[in-house]
Amino acid sequence: MAQSAITSFLTGTRERTGIDIQDGGIYDDDDQSSPVQPPGKRGRPNTPENRTVSSDAFSNDPDPNLLNFLSQFESRMKDMLTDFEKHLDEKMKSVDVKIRAAINEAITSKIAPIKSELAEINAELQDELSLLRAENLKIKEDLNQVTLLANQNSQYSRRLQLRFSGVPLSEMEKKEPFNVKHCISSLVKTLSDTPIHPKLVSDDIETAHRLPQHKRADQSQIIIRLKSKAVRDDFIGNRFLLKGTGIRVYEDLSPMNRGLLRRLTDHGSISNCWSDRGKILGKTKNGVIRVFQVTDDIDNIITDMENAPAKPPVIRKPRKQVV
């Protein structure tokens, strides 16, 4: 390090002054033939042989003072460079903070109006969304109400009607399949052939016909319309007398009520379901009974029924048998 510093120093000296120190002498670049004579050698001819320099003055060993000076100079320069770098870093950080603050301020000033406008638009959209939701809920409620009324009207028109299955096709019906009297006669005769049966005579029936049946045409269902609701309710109340005879009696349900009854039948949490005077009832496994509507959310209602406390069984009085 010190040797390279001395070399740099001597080279710099030559470049600044034009004086070269070499071969024990000091030469001027302008006159290489006239070396400067060292002190104490005057009077001699200025020839290359007489060019001598004191070994003490121009020794090959570097001057310790010079080395010390150069070392201190180098250390000082390093310290100055380090201080400069620190100062520069601090300045750059300060400049960076100011630049970032200026950028943020500029962005904020530009974005603030946009955010305010977006907030107003969002508030308007939220108001419109709330109105649309309220309107949608109102439409849904109105639609449910219309559906209920339509189903009630459809079921009311069937209030005097009953369906029978398990009634064989008579010979007269085979000859005249669309004859109402033959259909009524087949039903009344089949009921009268059973040991115990609800009371029903031909005069109680207003009309009757068979429904199309794809599996067994000889035992297709019969739908009848009775003349009075009292006869209908009395017959339905005693239909348990036909248990085990192969003859089944059903209320004539509207299409929507039939679909509701089918969904309850297929539901795993319903232990029993039936119809009563046009209403559909279901019973969960914990004994809770409820009337279902065609617009009900069946799954949610059944979940509430399962979480409700079980009701004790109701002991009914036996119905009066009418033969």
Image (spheres, helix red, strand yellow):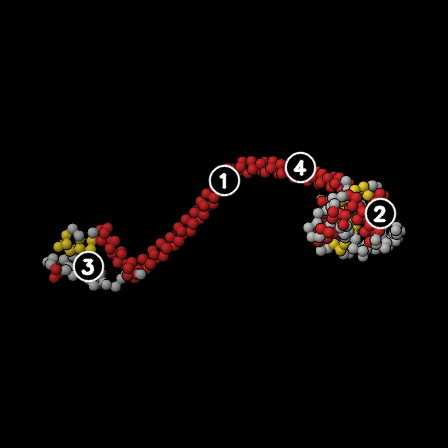
Compute the Cα span from label 1 to label 3.
68 Å
The residue that disc 2 covers is 200
Where residue 59 appears, as percent x and y from the top left, is 23, 63
Front residue (pair 43, 10): 10
Going from N to C along the chain, the mark reached first, 1 or 3, is 3
Residue type pointed to by label 3? Gln
Residue drawn at 68 percent across, 50 percent down: 214
Q: Residue 22, labelled with which disc?
A: 3
Residue type pointed to by label 2? Leu
Front residue (pair 2, 149): 149
Is there a contact, CB below 8 Å, between mark 4 and mark 2? no
Is there a contact, CB below 8 Å, between mark 1 and mark 3? no
The residue that disc 1 covers is 107
Residue type pointed to by label 1? Ile
- Indicate the quadrant containing the N terminus: top left, top right, bottom left or bottom right: bottom left
Q: Say what secondary structure mark 4 lies in.
A: helix
Compute the Cα span from label 3 to label 4.
107 Å
Going from N to C along the chain, the mark reached first, 3 or 4, is 3
Front label number (3 vs 4): 4
Is there a contact, CB below 8 Å, between mark 4 and mark 1? no
